[in-house]
Image (cartoon, coloured by chain):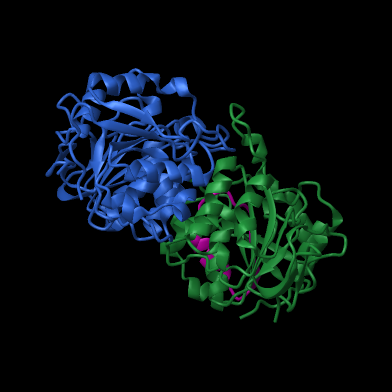
Chain colours: A green, B blue
Amino acid sequence: MKPRALVPGDLISFVSPASALDREKLDFSIALLEGWGYRVRLEDHALDSWGLFAGTDADRAADLMKAFTDPEVAAVYCTRGGYGCARLFPYLDLDAMAASGKMFLGFSDITVLHTPLNRRGLPTVHAPMGLTLHTPREPWVYESLRQAFIGGNPIPDEAPKGTTLIPGVVEGEVSGGCMILMCDSLGTPESVDLAGKIVLIEDVDEFPHRVDAMLTHLINSGQLGSAAGLVIGEMTRTDEKADPTIKGTPWREIVKERVMPLGLPTVIDFPFGHGKQMLSLPQGIRARFDAGAGTLEYLESLCR
Amino acid sequence: MKPRALVPGDLISFVSPASALDREKLDFSIALLEGWGYRVRLEDHALDSWGLFAGTDADRAADLMKAFTDPEVAAVYCTRGGYGCARLFPYLDLDAMAASGKMFLGFSDITVLHTPLNRRGLPTVHAPMGLTLHTPREPWVYESLRQAFIGGNPIPDEAPKGTTLIPGVVEGEVSGGCMILMCDSLGTPESVDLAGKIVLIEDVDEFPHRVDAMLTHLINSGQLGSAAGLVIGEMTRTDEKADPTIKGTPWREIVKERVMPLGLPTVIDFPFGHGKQMLSLPQGIRARFDAGAGTLEYLESLCR
């Protein structure tokens, strides 16, 4: 059920399954994708606004289902994360979405959708949102995304390596994403299942104690300890949220204290997450993770 | 396994299983409890400081175990919440704690401990922390706590009623507590089990979208819909955290939008939570909840 590699002329559908956004924020990404030879279509409700969300749950879900089931669409690209995907489950046909074989891209709140699609056999791409592509980025960021679209190697040589916490080499399916959404899935029918997986972990705008609490939740559930290896990105803007009245513990120290006792191959500061410079990382396909070298190498193509 | 009603001369043990605190913040609560005729003892590590916590995990857990197993102690009272209880599971003997029949009091992060103790048959008390009793409070706040200690009626006539969202009368065991800790338990061996329960829900310092996300997590897990009724307290300091760049949705509207489709007997603004004026509410015993009248009436005493 792998997606087809995109070719020039293919149609990319922009959908907004979570928070609302302004149209002009998409100008850059539309021009970028059109420059690569693709066509871009905004779905009907992509620019709607309803409370905290880009339209009602029913409308956001309808856009997703339309994009996933329209034969003309080659890839479904999320414009923005924020919050809202977890509200959509009553409205989605996840089996049909996975069976569509469409390429699906996004991260952050979109983690909520990666997990069930991967579980149903559709690999997806943990990629920068359409909204944020205009942020000045290194050339390898765009090259990584471009390679994802064509099923190439999404980890350019120029991308930084991860920093080793615990060395070790493992192979497994890449999974995970934004930590708070992984936690928000625990105990639900669409829970993450990290057993034997190479787990991506990143987050943004969390208080230091919440980084600790979420890792503890993943540990207490038995999920984190069952992983094959941990590829930790960035916890963006966490240290700035430390309580100045107590001796703050920088997020990297919190992460080390929690995850190192698990003894799994682990790196930190792998280049993905809510920082500006991030790779586009396929999920739901197998990779070889060398934590000592700080590298992730895909063992198969994202595409059929 | 109900706790014994306290009598003058009984010893109350102050423990700090979560965040650190300053000694002088306890002066008021110690004087209050001594004024009621009780003795107060601070456990060995109650004033320790280790990173974000009141001592190491092992030390905080050792204090809890010492207090719960010391025959001289009649009640174990938590000085402060914050964050830290979920880290203690590897160090605690929850069966021995529950079998001790000690009275146990606290709320907020202490929700993490109420759930497994209630499940093992020990009723506990969702009560103000030792740290915060000095905050100016209505007389019924202190009267409620005093009645909890002696196994009396903890809901004085003077306490405000809840505001009806959906009327209905149900009976069941009182459960729940601070929402984020209920969520952080999902998918773990010590998960909340809300089926058939009268569920207390409150939280503090959460972003509006997180109130939505946590309710959605409890809904997606099937827990919230299985409850008998919902007794919602206050989401303290949530509206102040609304993003000014988007039309903020006040927390009461978010709660209504999420919980009213469940169709359960529900009240909001029941007097408990992180606001100043809060009842001390036993958990793990049965009550009659009249959502139309906005009242909770215990059907049995906290004490044996």
Which of B42 and B288 lies nearest the eye of the viewer?
B42
> Residue B143 falls in which quadrant of the image?
top left
- Judged left or right of residue A237, residue B224 is left
Query: Is residue B297 something one can see in this rendering?
Result: yes
Q: Residue B144, image x and y in percent?
A: 22, 29
* Identity of the residue drawn at 83% across and 57% down: A160
Q: In the figure, A41 relative to A286: above or below?
A: above
Residue at 38% over, 57% down: B191
What is the quadrant of the C terminus of chain B in the image?
top left
A127 lies above or below B270:
below
Any magenta on residue A72? yes
Is residue A85 in sight in this rendering? Answer: no
Q: Nearer the viewer, residue A190 or B116?
A: B116
Judge from the rendering whether residue A273 lies leftward or rightward of residue B298; answer left or right. right
Indicate left or right for B105 with A195 as reference. left
Q: Position of residue B10 (x, y in %)?
A: 24, 31
Report which quarter residue A66 is drawn in. bottom right
The region drawn magenta spans: A61-85
